[in-house]
Amino acid sequence: MFLHVIMVIGGLFIIGWGFWAAHNAKKPLDLIGSFSILIGLAAAVIGTLLLCVPGFFSS
């Protein structure tokens, strides 16, 4: 459960950095920042899902 909280916090941090990089960084870093928003969103959503439904991915 502790790792799920880290996934949510890390995902939110990556989203925040991605928004900053997409708007303020120079040319190659803004593209990396915009793609990192998607990765951070996926990590935050999966972490939240695993916090709410702990056995979601286990069969």
Image (cartoon, rainbow, N blue to C red):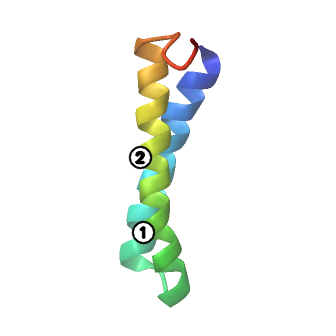
Marker disc for residue 41: 2
Q: Residues within 10 Å of mark 2 (few under 14, many from 20)?
A: some
Q: Which quadrant does the N terminus fall into? A: top right
Q: Position of residue 42 (x, y in %)?
A: 45, 44
The residue positioned farthest toward the front in the image shown: 59
SS assignment at label 1: helix
SS assignment at label 2: helix
Q: Which quadrant does the C terminus fall into? A: top right
Marker disc for residue 58: none
Q: At label 2, which amino acid type do we have?
A: Leu
Q: Are marks 1 and 2 in contact (CB under 8 Å)?
A: no
Q: Position of residue 11 (x, y in %)?
A: 49, 43
The vertical placement of 10 against 37, above or below, is above
How far apart in space, not on screen, are marks 1 and 2 (Cα)? Answer: 11 Å
Using the rendered view, name the quadrant where residue 45 is placed: top left
- Left or right of 40 in this view: 3: right
Residue that numbered label 1 is attached to: 34
* Frontmost residue, 6 versus 24: 6
* Frontmost residue, 47 versus 20: 47
The vertical placement of 17 against 56, above or below, is below
Residue at left offset 59%, top offset 30%: 6
- Left or right of 59 in this view: 56: left
Residue at left offset 49%, top offset 28%: 47
Q: Position of residue 46 (x, y in %)?
A: 47, 32
Q: Residues within 10 Å of mark 1 (few under 14, many from 20)?
A: some
Give the mark nearest the N terminus, 1 or 2: 1
The residue positioned farthest toward the right in the image shown: 3
Using the rendered view, name the quadrant where residue 12 is placed: top left
Q: At label 1, which amino acid type do we have?
A: Ser
